[in-house]
Image (cartoon, helix red, strand yellow):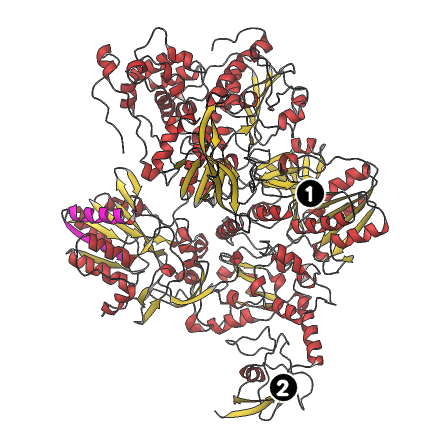
């Protein structure tokens, strides 16, 4: 184990100079040799001592950049101070003022490009491990209990429907419920959580944690209807007959395929299917759970984002060799550096500057390999990244029995299809007023990936915060109460 | 005994006196067809397939019961005999589902669907686990005719699936009597016999008691001898015909019974008897348990080395080195605790290792666990600090003891409390995966043969011990194969016999294998009272879900459900489907909506029981809950007045066309409904369909009702009589593919409802993608109804079969293995099949 023992006897009372010299506390992690064979969480969390030590590094800036860097504006120095003082439950309550999902955000947010990027300590050394501390406080509360139910404002008599129980929907539901509105959530799948349940693997975000957070929402008085497909079971128009406002957060759940020959062969999966089977359907516990897992002997994952990393690492755990094929170079990879690092540590092989052009199959239409072309980087494209250009005649085949396509998702069409009065963009996303977050239909708001296109959990939550505020103003004509 | 001479088909045959005519014919390689005859059974004369003509003898005597007499003139083949045998076969088939044998599409269908459907009831060969081994089928196919003049009478007996290990479907039984005769021969007093009289005669236990209390020993002989698929081994049922038979011995207890290991593709399917006689008898554990032990998902598959609190997977070299280091560094003496369920060679090598390490070795009886007295004595030595390292080849040490031992090496096949807290764990190949020899309680030495592949990195123990000894620097362990060890083993004592007689009484079965409670590994054994570890509380949230108001088996395998699902009912439209999960642990499976009532808040479904998910649903009763119902999903059919619409439904499609027919009728179309089934008794919903269409045409593959054939034939006939403006087909992929070929040639616009594998059903995963008109479409959100002429049927068929192997595994390991008989048996004809009798 890579646990570093905490330095002795240091608390918030220690003089500032000494504190700054404390190094950023590493997170104990499961040994890569072991974790590549199991689905247990990779980072193991701080101990109380380590958390307090790490928290003591925070210099409590007057103008904290970290708060600005946070899409949901968590009062970061305040909660860290409480941890440093050993007031862990208070720290959690401080977090909960701004985020409905601290245990989730502490795990899956890209802190290095948000709060921690703005940390003043990062200018000369390493920033405070804000994400790890957030996770610690949330885990502490979950394990030890004794977290009081959050305060709720008096009932407003307004009813709000939230469509989609993913990160954006959960955030809106949590906020609006605290402000006294009656919130009913509609989830198409059989468990609430959205991408947190079906997409992010167990080893990054244990599903028990997601369900714990969902239960917290229920304790706040939010009603959650699962198996309820808005657009099918009922349309948005019909919802508006019984609700005062509707928030649409149906996410980016329509997988994009490569459009190359033989893509429907047996053994080619969207990352969504591969991950949904493993995570939501718990195929990793087959045969106790009935859904068949895909057990690749040689998996090739196409893509360079976090979903590709999740897929490749899941494939590794379910089977044997796991390779990532990405058409640009490592610098252009949209995945978090930590995820790429974890994948490499576990033994995922990276074929960079490589583009798949054809799936190779046997006579029974089962995948036997992926034919690829080598690429080289040319001029920057619209995204500012250097455009990959194919090297002529560089075709080669990577043997594989499983191909996972993780090149992105489009907005799920079920709601837009059945609500023609809601305007959409040419990409199928719902267009909203950037300030009010309202769609072209009065009283109907939207946020998360269905508006922004596929993005991160925290950006969806950030939009959820904005939307909740806008919806409250729309419903009540004023700012929300302090609770 | 002298020999006699007779003439069979003009051929002079010499046989020993006392032989039957059948034996004489076989000696001369003359084939006479038989069903009830078996080399290990006395002649019975029940099936009458073996009739012959004998000069001077009146009638057609059965050759199996007629003694050969000197000078006898026997004729085995004549037009008259063929006629009579075919009649006999027909009679047998009138009580045995046979529609595939007379179906005019059989060859195309079997080519298209090479694997049998894993249905609950075998209502035809294509649904029968025994298809590839069926004597009746072989005989019918060799007769070459696909005409039967007698109607099929499906008995509608309940499926009997409540007993451990066995599935029994007496609807297939032809009363050849092999099962009860072999039972009588092996056990003296048979557990089963013919019960009832006349057309209700069937095989059963006395008073129709559960087999667990009938004196049945679960030796499996009846399953192995059954020619029809009536009796099947639930675990091996859908694996198909075994590929290899390997003689070996079972070492689960000191009896060391000889077995024939049946395997396929490197997997052990069953240990079976070496012959059908008392001496070759097996106990339930050997017959059924061994295959489930080696297939357990609790197998250890890779070497593990403890580092702090973590177990790190290692390669063999690293793990062996770590184990050697641990043994060297322990600073005290070593003890070995070895289960007797190991080969002589393995034990010899363990003993050598103990000797060279100057340690002691405890040999525990096969059934021993960590509470064995010898282990208790060892505990004292551990406590005193004299023993500082232990090697155990099973769950043979109590956890409290392991925590006190500085170094514990577990060499075993299954995860256990012992392996979970050991210092090093090495995965072992066991039973059918490892060779060597075994000395039985009677002193005999038996050869063990390898008949299946060990999972993951597991190695045989002799190899593990040799490598470990060499890593320890010990001399004399350079063996290259287990055979080179065998000659060195001498004077090993015979183990003590097991208490009781497990081959005669299921309550005498040994409770453990290498210290693991067998009922934990093979749950069905709990039915015999074998102890098991108490289960952790289940995650099921009982009492939540969608209540089932009505549930009936309206035709064999076809279950009608009426479920309370108000929102789904309110918004359903013709052509849509729902996704169901029977339990929280189930798959998400799509089912077409058959009917709905918004006012009542109910939906109706017809679910065909053909796999694990539908089996879970079918196991629910009225009053139970379905955990999840999601829908309505998919695009509905656009209802327009097209003129004349022909709807074709087969299997579940008979129910699925109902709402379409009703809506199209209301829209002013002339609606013709055509429904197909293999045989008349598999039809359902005829009355309901007749009320929503102008004409109902029935087709059966065996011609037992309506048009002989399927939707193809009906389509051709209807199109010849009147113009068809729209054709819609719902049913199995084979049927839809065949009918679209015909409708294309007739230029009839055709829609089909596709049924690919789905996961979420909301467009999120793409599992259900199908190619239609060279475009990839998602059946869940773009369908399920598509232009039938554009569908890539080959792709659909291959994608539908992508999980065939996993499905077999799921069925053999499904919860039903736990199904016990504690629910009271309602009999004799207990309903449930909905046949009304």
Task: Say whether residue A187 is left or right of residue B324.
Answer: right
Task: Say whether residue B447 is left or right of residue A399.
Answer: left
Question: Callout 1: helix, strand or loop?
Answer: helix
Task: Identify the residue shown where x is 64% and y is 24%.
Answer: A416
The region drawn magenta spans: B317-339
Q: Position of residue B149 (x, y in %)?
A: 74, 68
Q: Which residue is mark 2?
A: B9
Q: Nearer the viewer, mark 2 or mark 1?
A: 1
Task: Say whether residue B454 is left or right of residue B124.
Answer: left
**Among numbered discs 2 and 1, the one appearing first in the sequence:** 2
Q: Which mark is residue B306?
A: none
Instruction: Depth check: give the residue in front, A211 or A382.
Output: A382
Q: Position of residue B24 (x, y in %)?
A: 55, 85
The quadrant of the image that shows the N terminus of chain A is: top left
Task: Name the subunit of mark 2.
Answer: B
Residue B338 in the image: above or below residue B501:
above
**Circle 2 crowding by C-alpha within 10 Å: few under 14, some 14–19, many from 20:** some
Q: Which residue is mark 1?
A: B790
**Residue B327: within the magenta?**
yes
């Amino acid at each position: 184990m890579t646990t570093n023992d905490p330095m002795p006897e240091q608390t918030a009372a220690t003089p500032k100079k000494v504190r700054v010299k404390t190094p950023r506390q590493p997170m104990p992690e499961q040994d890569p040799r072991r974790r590549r064979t199991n689905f247990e969480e990779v980072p193991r969390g701080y101990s109380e001592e380590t958390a307090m030590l790490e928290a003591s590094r925070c210099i409590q800036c007057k103008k904290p950049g970290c708060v600005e860097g946070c899409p949901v504006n968590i009062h970061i120095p305040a909660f860290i101070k409480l941890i440093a003082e050993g007031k862990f439950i208070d720290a959690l309550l401080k977090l909960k003022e701004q985020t409905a999902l601290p245990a989730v955000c502490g795990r899956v947010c890209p802190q290095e490009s948000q709060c921690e990027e703005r940390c003043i300590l990062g200018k000369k050394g390493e920033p405070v491990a804000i994400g790890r501390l957030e996770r610690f406080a949330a885990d502490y509360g979950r394990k030890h209990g004794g977290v009081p139910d959050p305060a709720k404002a008096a009932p407003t008599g307004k009813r709000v429907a939230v469509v989609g129980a993913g990160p954006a929907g959960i955030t809106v539901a949590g906020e609006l419920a605290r402000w006294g509105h009656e919130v009913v959530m509609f989830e198409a799948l059989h468990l609430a959580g959205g991408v947190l349940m079906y997409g992010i693997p167990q080893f990054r975000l244990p599903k028990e944690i997601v369900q714990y957070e969902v239960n917290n929402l229920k304790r706040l008085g939010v009603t959650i209807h699962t198996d309820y497909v808005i657009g099918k079971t009922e349309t948005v128009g019909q919802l508006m007959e019984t609700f005062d406002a509707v928030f649409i957060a149906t996410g980016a759940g329509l997988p994009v395929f490569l459009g190359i020959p033989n893509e429907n062969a047996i053994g080619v999966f969207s990352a969504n299917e591969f991950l949904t089977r493993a995570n939501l359907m718990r195929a990793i516990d087959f045969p106790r759970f009935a859904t068949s897992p895909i057990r690749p002997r040689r998996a090739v994952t196409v893509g360079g984002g976090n979903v590709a990393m999740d897929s490749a690492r899941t494939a590794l755990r379910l089977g044997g060799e796991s390779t990532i094929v990405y058409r640009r170079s490592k610098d252009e990879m949209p995945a978090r550096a930590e995820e790429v690092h974890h994948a490499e540590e576990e033994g995922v092989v990276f074929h960079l500057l490589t583009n798949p052009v054809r799936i190779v199959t046997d006579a029974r239409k089962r995948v036997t390999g992926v034919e690829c072309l080598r690429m080289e980087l040319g001029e920057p494209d619209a995204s500012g990244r250097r455009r990959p250009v194919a090297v002529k005649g560089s075709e080669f085949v990577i043997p594989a029995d499983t191909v996972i396509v993780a090149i992105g998702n489009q907005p799920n069409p079920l709601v837009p299809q059945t609500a023609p009065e809601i305007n959409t963009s040419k990409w199928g996303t719902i267009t909203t007023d950037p300030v009010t977050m309202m769609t072209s239909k009065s009283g109907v708001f939207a946020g998360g990936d269905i508006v922004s296109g596929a993005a991160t959990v925290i950006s969806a939550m950030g939009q959820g915060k904005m939307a909740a505020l806008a919806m409250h103003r729309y419903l009540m004509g004023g700012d929300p109460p302090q609770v | 005994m002298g020999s006699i001479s007779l003439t069979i088909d003009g051929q002079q045959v010499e046989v020993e006196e006392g032989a039957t005519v059948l034996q004489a014919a076989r000696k001369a390689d003359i084939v006479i067809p038989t069903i009830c005859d078996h080399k290990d059974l006395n002649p019975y004369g029940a099936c009458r397939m073996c009739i012959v003509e004998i000069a001077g003898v009146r009638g057609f005597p059965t050759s199996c019961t007629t003694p050969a007499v000197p000078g006898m003139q026997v004729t085995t083949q004549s037009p008259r005999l063929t006629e009579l045998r075919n009649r006999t076969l027909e009679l047998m088939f009138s009580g045995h589902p046979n529609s595939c044998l007379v179906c005019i599409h059989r060859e195309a269908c079997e080519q298209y669907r090479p694997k049998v459907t894993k249905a609950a009831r075998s209502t035809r060969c294509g649904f029968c686990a025994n298809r590839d081994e069926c004597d009746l089928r072989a005989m019918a196919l060799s007769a070459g005719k696909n005409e039967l003049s007698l109607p099929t009478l499906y008995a509608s007996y309940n499926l009997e699936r409540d007993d451990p290990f066995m599935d029994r479907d007496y609807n297939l039984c032809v009363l050849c009597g092999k099962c009860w005769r072999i039972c009588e021969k092996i056990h003296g007093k048979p557990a089963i016999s013919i019960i009832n009289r006349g057309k209700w005669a069937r095989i059963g236990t006395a008073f129709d008691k559960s087999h667990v209390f009938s004196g049945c020993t679960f030796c499996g002989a009846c399953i192995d001898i059954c020619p029809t698929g009536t009796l099947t081994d639930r675990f091996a049922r859908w694996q198909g015909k075994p590929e290899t038979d390997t003689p070996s011995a079972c070492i689960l207890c000191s009896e060391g019974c000889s077995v024939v290991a049946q395997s396929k593709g490197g997997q052990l399917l069953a240990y079976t008897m070496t012959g059908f006689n008392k001496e070759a008898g097996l106990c339930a554990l050997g017959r059924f348990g061994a295959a489930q032990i080696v297939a357990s998902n609790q197998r250890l598959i890779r070497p593990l080395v403890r580092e702090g609190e973590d177990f790190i997977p290692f390669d063999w070299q690293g793990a062996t080195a770590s184990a050697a280091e641990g043994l060297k560094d322990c600073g005290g003496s070593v003890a070995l605790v070895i289960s007797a369920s190991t080969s002589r060679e393995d034990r010899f090598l363990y003993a050598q290792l103990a000797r060279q390490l100057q340690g002691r070795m405890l040999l525990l009886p096969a059934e021993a666990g960590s509470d064995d007295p010898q282990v208790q004595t060892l505990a004292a030595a551990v406590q005193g600090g004299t023993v500082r390292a232990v090697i155990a080849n099973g769950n043979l040490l109590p956890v409290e003891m392991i925590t006190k031992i500085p170094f514990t090496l577990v060499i075993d096949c299954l995860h256990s409390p012992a392996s979970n807290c050991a210092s090093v764990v090495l995965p072992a190949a066991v039973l059918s995966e490892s060779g060597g020899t075994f000395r039985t309680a009677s002193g005999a030495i038996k050869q063990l043969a390898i008949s299946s592949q060990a999972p993951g990195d597991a190695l045989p123990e002799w190899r593990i011990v040799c490598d470990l000894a060499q890593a320890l620097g010990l001399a004399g362990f350079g063996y290259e194969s287990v055979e080179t060890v065998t000659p060195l083993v001498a004077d090993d004592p015979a183990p003590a016999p097991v208490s009781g007689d497990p081959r005669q009484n299921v309550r005498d079965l040994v409770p453990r294998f290498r210290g693991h409670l067998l009922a934990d590994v093979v749950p069905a054994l709990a039915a015999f009272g074998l102890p098991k570890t108490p289960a952790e509380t289940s995650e099921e949230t009982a009492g939540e879900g969608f209540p089932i108001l009505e549930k009936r088996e309206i035709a064999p395998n076809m279950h009608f459900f009426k479920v309370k699902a108000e929102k789904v009912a309110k918004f359903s439209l013709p052509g849509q489907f729902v996704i169901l999960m029977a339990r929280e642990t189930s798959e998400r499976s799509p089912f077409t909506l058959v009917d709905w009532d918004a006012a009542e808040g109910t939906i109706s479904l017809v679910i065909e029981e053909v796999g694990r998910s539908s089996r879970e649903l079918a196991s629910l009763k009225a009053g139970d809950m379905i955990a999840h119902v999601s829908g309505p999903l998919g695009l509905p059919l656009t209802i327009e007045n097209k003129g004349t619409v022909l709807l074709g439904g087969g299997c579940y499609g008979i129910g699925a066309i109902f709402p379409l027919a009703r809506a199209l009728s209301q829209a002013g179309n002339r609606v013709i409904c055509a429904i197909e089934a293999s045989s008349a008794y598999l039809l359902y919903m005829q009355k309901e369909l007749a009320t929503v269409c102008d004409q109902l045409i029935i087709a059966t593959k065996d011609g037992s009702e309506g048009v002989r054939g399927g939707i193809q034939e009906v389509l051709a006939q209807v199109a010849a009589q009147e113009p068809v403006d729209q054709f819609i087909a719902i049913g199995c992929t084979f049927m839809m593919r065949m009918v679209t070929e015909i409708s294309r040639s007739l230029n009839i616009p055709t829609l089909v409802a596709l049924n690919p594998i789905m996961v979420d059903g909301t467009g999120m995963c793409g599992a259900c993608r199908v190619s239609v008109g060279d475009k990839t479409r998602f059946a869940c959100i773009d369908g399920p109804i598509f232009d039938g002429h554009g569908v890539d049927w080959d792709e659909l068929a291959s994608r539908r079969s992508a999980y065939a192997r996993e499905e077999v595994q799921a069925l053999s390991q499904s919860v039903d293995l736990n199904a016990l008989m504690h629910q009271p048996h309602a009999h004799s004809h207990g309903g449930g099949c909905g046949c009304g009798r």
